[in-house]
Amino acid sequence: MPATTMDQLVALCKRRGFIFQNADIYGGLQGVYDYGPLGVELKNNIKAAWWRAMIYERDDVEGLDAAILTNRKVLHYSGHEDTFSDPMTDCRKCKGRFRADHIKDGKCPNCGSTDLTEPRPFNLMFKTTVGPVDNADNIAYLRPETAQAIFTQFKNVVDSTSRKLPFGIAQIGKSFRNEITPRNFIFRVREFEQAELEYFVDPGDDEKWHEYWKEERIRWWEEQGLPREHMNIYTTPKDDLAHYAKACYDIEYQFPHGMEELEGIANRTDYDLGNHTKAQEEFGLTSKVHANPESTQKLAILNDEKKKWEVPFVIEPSMGVDRAVLAVLTEAYTEEDLGEGNSRIVLKLKKHLAPIKVAIIPLKKNNEQIMNKCHEIKQNLMKLGIGRIALENTGNIGKAYRRHDEVGTPLCLTVDFETIEQQPESVTLRDRDTMQQIRVNTADLPNYLREYFMK
Ligand code: ATP
């Protein structure tokens, strides 16, 4: 189990510019965080890895980027207005407010009192009004999951891409939940990002695809650096399933605060499309749906073999991007004893996730000749398209190495007097994990780096 503590991660994230408390100068906004210069790179790299695996490497998934503001009817017919709630309880002694299902031994987590109110449902959706008039007709929501727009755009995507089953629609974007008790850094927050795939299948094939996606997603997490033994697959008991699900696996990860959900993989059956479709009675839906007199579209697809229109089932792998950032950081954070009282912190991130790929470090600060060479090398390496290449001008190599170890930069490239004075021109490359240094001719750098970052 990773020995990393949450305090270590929070401190590193602030010190090196990964994650900051939102509105820090005003004391923060609870459950809301901002990603700093390196955090945004790491998060973008995680999202790019997900997008690549879901869309570019496959031939059966299309992308979507839908709006956050959501028409009230969508979340009415999806069931979220009625059922998207957590049980909330109040402590009569200290006035603390908690999720009832997180209370242990009937005691207030704050003061230990057992004088708690009966749990009552608290709807997690953020409500707002659209337009200048603040009345009930103008209510809209910030989406609590990205999935609903995939269902409401189902017909437009099918019509514009001529897809047949099985196929998927993938989306990455912000979601909002008014969590009763946000906690554990970016693990449970009120504004977060999700990466969700809705994979539409023939009814009857759903269980097979549910198993398939569970395995695919475990494999993907391993590729991001999480070993299988730090994950757990939790099968949600029938009584705890979300209102739309027939079955659900949670991929859990050993976070610093415990083994907790990283991604949910749900079998949502024909529940969502069934609730949003016009003419529900035509499709022999298996889910219990609410009558929908307002939808204007049939959300069905033609099954060529069966020669009939059907509402497909859907399998949904849904990952929290912020939880992915936290898991990847937890796994990568390492404190190494270098002997003789020396130690270093090193983020052993997978190369494709590292915020900075190569740091170019001049041996001497403000030396024009060396700096010109650094700029020239940077311009050349940028053409490789391997990601961010940073140029340092601190003049302190030891300090630069320490900083780049801490932020997970795989390679530091040093330009010294030998580089500009001797032929063939060469630079020093230092590997983050082994700390070994090698001399590489500048002319060979593009090939060397291409191969290094491909591995
Ligand atoms: P939990 O049981 O932890 O509240 P959930 O089962 O309600 O999560 P889902 O509705 O399945 O979560 O959402 C899919 C994914 O979105 C989760 O696996 C998680 O990674 C992420 N997620 C959900 N709620 C939050 C949150 N408040 N903060 C950060 N990520 C979240």
Image (spheres, rainbow, N blue to C red):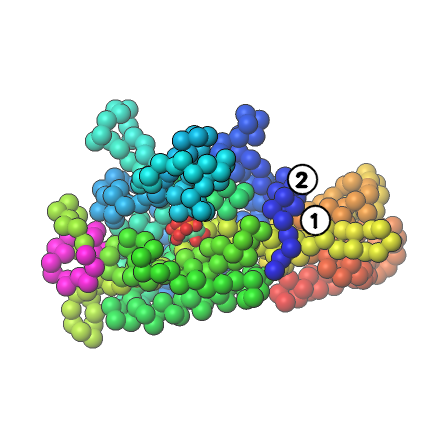
SS at mark 1 in the image? helix
Q: Label 1 near label 2: C-beta < 8 Å?
A: yes
20 displayed left or right of 311: right
Category of crowding for the residue at label 2, using alpha-carbon neighbours closer than 10 angstroms: few (below 14), some (14–19), many (at least 20): few
The residue at 64%/52% (across/down) is 4
On the question of residue 144 being in view, the answer is yes
Residue found at the far bottom of this picture: 305
Q: Earlier in the sequence, mark 2 or mark 1?
A: 2
Expressed as whole percent of the image width and height from the top left, the position of residue 196 reads 40, 55
Q: Which sits in the foreground, 380 or 347?
A: 347
Residue type at mark 1 is Glu
* Residue underneath mark 1: 406
Vertical relation: 319 (above or below) 27: below
Relative image position of residue 131 (x, y in whole percent) = 28, 28
Is residue 56 within the magenta segment? no
Q: Is residue 44 visible?
A: no
The numbered dot on residue 297 is none
Disc 2 residue type (three-letter): Arg
Q: What residue is drawn where x is 42% and y is 44%?
A: 106
In the image: residue 38, left or right of residue 82:
right
Total marks drawn?
Answer: 2
**CA gap, disc 2 and disc 1:** 10 Å
Residue, disc 2: 15
Q: Residue at x 40, y 42 (%)?
A: 99
Q: Which residues are magenta?
A: 273-288
